[in-house]
Image (cartoon, grey):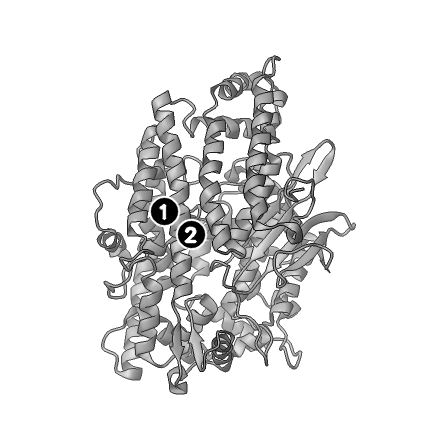
C-alpha cells in the first residue's frame, strides 16, 4: 500500500520512497476531482454548506501529499525528487486550473455569492465565500474559452520556469567552492569559522579549508577575512549566481517569467502583474507601494549616505583604501562596529549556544502565550538532524506538533523559512491541530564546539519561530484561512515582532548564558547590542528598499521591451545605489524570493510589516514586554485569527488604532 494514500496523522517519512510520490499525486488528484464532481452534480440548490464549504474541505489528502513533497524538495532534496517536482508541478497547476475554470462549479459559487446578503453568514464564512469567489474570478473563470486555454498554458509554463530558476540557483550555490591550502589566506577569520572550513574540507576528502556560498561559510569570510582579493572572488561568485551565460544561466528565465506574468495579468483585465497581486494586499495598489517605499527612501537616504561616507573614510584611514567596493562593506563595517561599540559576533557567540536559544524562544512563548514545548522521539522525521516537539497550553491541551531543522546540508536550499505539514481547522466538532516546521541554515557544531549562533542567527531563529507561532496558535474553522494564510504584507508581522525580544534584557536573561561557564550575558554587552542595533540602519534600510523597488520595477510595468536583464536592474537601483556597480554580478538572476518564492510584487512587505511590528512592540514596551494582557490581545486578534478578517481590522482591534510609521523611524534611529 502506498503510505501516502493510507490515512496518517504525522507524516510517515520512514515508509515513503521517492517512487511513491507520483502515483500518490495522481490518485489524490483523481479523488479530489471526484469530490468536485460530487459538488457540481448535486441536484439540490447551491448553498454555502453544499458548495463553498464542500469545496473548502475537498482535496485534503492531495494538500497533505503536496506539503510533504514540496517541503522535502526544499529541505532534503536530490536529483530524483527534483525530477518528480518538474513532472508533477505542471500537473498540479493543471489540476488547480481545472477547478478554477470549472464553469459548473463557478456557476454554483456565483449563485451563493449573489445571495450572500440574505444568508446570515458569520464573518469567517463571508471571508471564505469572498475568497472562493475571487479565487475563480482572479483565475479566469469569467474568461472566454480561448483565453482560458491560454491561461492554462501560461500557468503550466510558469510553474516549470519557477522550479528551473530555483534549481539553477541551488546548483550554482553547490557548484562553487573556494579551496584554500595556505593558512595565511584565513587571516582574520575567527577560530570557529576556520574549524568549520577545515571540517568541510575534511568531509570532502580535501586538505586545508573550504569556503562555500552557504551563509554560515560565506558571511564570516566576508566579514573577517583580511585578504581582499579572496573576498572579491567570493563576493563576485555569490553575486553572479545564474549570470554566467551557461546552462545554469537565469537571464532568459527572468524575462520569460515577467513577460508571462504580465500577459496573465492582462488576460485577467489588470494593467500589470503588480496591480493583480496588490488587489489582495493591505497596500492595495502599486502607486501606494511606490509612495510607501519612496517616502521611506527620502527619510533613510541622508542617513545612509552619511554612514557610507563614514565607512569610506574609515577604510581609507585604516588601510588607505581609495574606493569602497561591495566586497569591502561587511569587512570594514564589522571593524568600525567593533571600534565604536567594542562589540563583535565572536564576543557574543559563546552566549548563544543553539540549544539554549531554542530553549529561550520556548520560554518567551511560555511567558507570553502560556505554551509548553516537550521534545519527543516517537514522531517520524525526514532527517536525523530534525528535532520534534509536542506543544501544549497551560491546561495540557495539545496545541501543535513542531519540527525544527537547523543546519545546512547538501539537499537543503539556503535561507530560513517556516512551513506546515498539516493545517489547523475545525470539522465535525473537532479542532484539528497543526503540524508546523521551522527550517534554517545555522552554523553547525564542530569537533570542539557546540553550534554557537551569531546574533543575526539568533534574530533569524526568533523570526521564523514567530511565523511558527502564527501557525501553531491558529484557531479558525477553515484550513485556507488558518495560520499564516493571510495577506502577504501582514504575514511578516508575527515573525518580525518576535525579533524585538532578542534585544531586551529580561528576555536575554532567560537564555543567553555562556556555553562553558554558564554565566549570564553581561549587561554591558546587552547595552551594546541595543546601541549597535541601529548601526548603519540607514544603509540597511536603503538595501531593503532597493530590493522592493527592483521587484516593483519588474512587475509594475510592461516588461515586453526589456532585452538586457542587467541593464534594466542597474536602472532600477539608481536611486538606492551606494557602492560602485560590478558588471560581473546580477541580483535578479538569483532573486529567488520574487522569481521562485511567492514575493513577486510583495518584497516591500518586509518594510511594511516592520512598520506594523515597531508599532506593535511599542505597545508591549508601554506596559512591560511580558505583559500577559497585551500578549493575549495579540494572540486573540492576530495570531489565532489567520486570514478570517481584513488585517487592518484585526490590527486595530489589537492596538486600538492604525500603525504609525514614526515608531519604526524612531526605533531605527532615523529620526
As drawn, is 558 to the left or to the right of 537? Answer: left
Q: Please tell me which residue lies in front, 657 or 616.
A: 616
Tags 2 and 1 touching, CB below 8 Å: yes
Residue 607 is marked as 2
Among the 4 quarters of the image, the one containing residue 65 = top right
Q: Residue 484: tell me if it is visible.
A: no
As drawn, is 512 to the left or to the right of 193? Answer: right
Question: In the figure, 482 relative to 83: above or below?
Answer: above
According to the picture, the residue beneath numbered tag 1 turns out to be 292
Among the 4 quarters of the image, the one containing residue 591 = bottom left
Residue at x-position 27% and y-position 80% = 316
Among the 4 quarters of the image, the one containing residue 142 = top left
Residue at x-position 38% and y-position 48% = 595
Q: Please tell me which residue lies in front, 398 or 607.
A: 398
SS assignment at label 1: helix
Residue 95 is marked as none
- State the quadrant of the N terminus: top right
Residue 385 coordinates in the image, percent (x, y): 61, 63
Mark earlier in primary sequence (2, 1): 1
Amino acid at each position: 500500500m502506498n503510505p501516502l494514500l493510507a490515512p496518517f496523522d504525522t507524516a510517515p517519512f520512514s515508509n515513503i520512497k521517492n517512487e511513491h510520490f507520483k502515483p500518490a499525486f495522481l490518485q489524490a488528484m483523481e479523488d479530489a476531482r471526484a469530490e468536485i464532481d460530487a459538488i457540481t452534480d448535486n441536484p439540490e440548490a447551491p448553498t454555502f454548506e453544499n458548495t463553498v464549504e464542500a469545496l473548502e474541505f475537498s482535496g485534503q489528502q492531495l494538500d497533505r501529499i503536496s506539503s510533504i513533497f514540496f517541503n522535502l524538495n526544499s529541505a532534503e532534496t536530490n536529483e530524483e525528487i527534483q525530477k518528480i517536482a518538474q513532472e508533477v508541478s505542471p500537473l498540479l497547476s493543471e489540476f488547480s486550473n481545472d477547478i478554477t475554470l470549472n464553469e459548473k462549479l463557478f456557476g454554483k459559487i456565483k449563485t451563493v455569492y449573489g445571495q450572500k446578503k440574505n444568508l446570515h453568514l458569520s464573518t469567517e464564512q463571508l471571508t471564505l465565500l469572498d475568497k472562493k469567489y475571487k479565487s475563480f474570478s482572479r483565475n479566469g473563470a469569467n474568461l472566454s474559452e480561448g483565453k482560458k486555454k491560454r491561461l492554462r498554458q501560461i500557468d503550466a509554463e510558469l510553474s516549470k520556469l519557477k522550479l528551473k530558476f530555483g534549481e539553477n540557483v541551488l546548483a550554482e550555490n553547490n557548484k562553487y567552492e573556494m579551496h584554500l591550502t595556505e593558512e595565511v589566506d584565513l587571516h582574520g577569520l575567527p577560530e570557529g569559522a576556520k574549524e568549520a572550513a577545515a571540517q568541510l574540507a575534511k568531509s570532502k576528502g580535501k586538505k586545508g579549508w573550504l569556503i562555500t556560498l552557504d551563509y554560515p561559510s560565506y558571511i564570516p569570510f566576508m566579514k573577517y577575512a583580511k585578504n581582499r582579493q579572496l573576498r572579491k572572488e567570493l563576493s563576485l561568485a555569490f553575486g553572479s549566481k545564474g549570470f554566467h551565460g551557461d546552462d545554469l544561466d537565469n537571464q532568459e528565465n527572468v524575462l520569460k517569467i515577467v513577460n508571462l506574468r504580465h500577459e496573465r495579468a492582462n488576460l485577467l483585465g489588470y494593467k500589470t502583474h503588480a496591480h493583480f497581486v496588490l488587489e489582495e494586499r493591505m497596500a492595495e495598489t502599486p502607486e501606494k507601494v511606490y509612495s510607501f517605499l519612496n517616502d521611506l527612501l527620502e527619510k533613510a537616504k541622508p542617513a545612509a549616505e552619511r554612514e557610507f561616507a563614514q565607512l569610506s573614510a574609515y577604510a581609507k584611514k585604516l588601510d588607505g583604501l581609495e574606493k569602497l567596493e561591495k566586497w569591502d562593506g561587511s569587512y570594514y563595517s564589522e571593524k568600525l562596529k567593533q571600534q565604536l561599540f567594542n562589540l563583535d559576533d565572536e564576543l557574543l557567540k559563546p552566549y548563544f549556544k543553539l540549544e539554549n536559544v531554542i530553549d529561550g524562544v520556548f520560554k518567551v512563548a511560555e511567558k507570553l502565550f502560556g505554551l509548553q514545548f516537550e521534545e519527543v522521539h516517537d514522531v517520524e522525521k525526514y532527517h536525523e538532524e530534525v528535532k520534534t516537539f509536542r506543544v501544549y497550553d497551560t491546561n495540557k491541551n495539545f496545541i501543535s506538533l513542531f519540527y525544527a531543522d537547523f543546519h545546512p546540508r547538501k539537499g537543503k536550499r539556503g535561507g530560513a523559512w517556516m512551513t506546515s505539514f498539516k493545517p489547523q481547522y475545525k470539522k465535525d466538532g473537532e479542532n484539528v491541530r497543526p503540524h508546523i516546521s521551522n527550517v534554517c541554515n545555522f552554523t553547525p557544531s564542530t569537533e570542539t564546539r557546540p553550534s554557537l549562533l551569531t546574533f543575526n542567527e539568533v534574530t533569524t531563529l526568533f523570526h521564523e519561530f514567530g511565523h511558527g507561532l502564527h501557525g501553531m496558535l491558529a484557531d479558525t474553522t477553515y484550513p485556507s484561512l488558518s495560520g499564516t494564510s493571510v495577506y502577504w504584507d501582514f504575514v511578516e508581522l508575527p515573525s518580525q515582532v518576535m525579533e524585538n525580544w532578542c534585544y531586551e534584557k529580561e528576555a536575554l536573561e532567560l537564555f543567553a548564558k555562556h556555553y562553558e561557564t554558564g554565566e549570564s550575558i553581561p549587561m554591558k554587552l546587552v547595552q551594546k547590542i541595543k546601541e549597535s542595533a541601529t548601526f548603519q540602519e540607514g544603509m540597511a534600510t536603503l538595501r531593503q528598499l532597493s530590493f522592493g523597488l527592483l521587484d516593483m520595477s519588474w512587475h509594475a510595468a510592461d516588461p515586453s521591451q526589456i532585452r538586457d536583464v542587467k541593464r534594466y536592474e542597474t536602472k532600477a537601483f539608481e536611486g538606492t545605489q551606494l557602492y560602485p556597480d560590478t558588471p560581473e554580478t546580477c541580483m535578479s538572476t538569483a532573486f529567488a524570493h520574487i522569481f521562485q518564492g511567492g514575493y513577486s510584487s510583495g518584497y516591500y512587505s518586509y518594510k511594511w510589516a516592520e512598520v506594523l511590528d515597531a508599532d506593535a512592540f511599542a505597545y508591549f514596551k508601554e506596559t512591560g514586554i511580558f505583559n500577559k494582557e497585551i500578549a493575549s490581545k495579540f494572540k486573540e486578534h492576530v495570531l489565532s485569527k489567520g486570514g478570517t478578517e481584513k488585517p487592518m481590522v484585526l490590527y486595530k482591534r489589537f492596538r486600538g488604532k492604525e500603525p504609525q510609521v514614526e515608531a519604526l523611524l524612531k526605533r531605527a534611529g532615523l529620526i
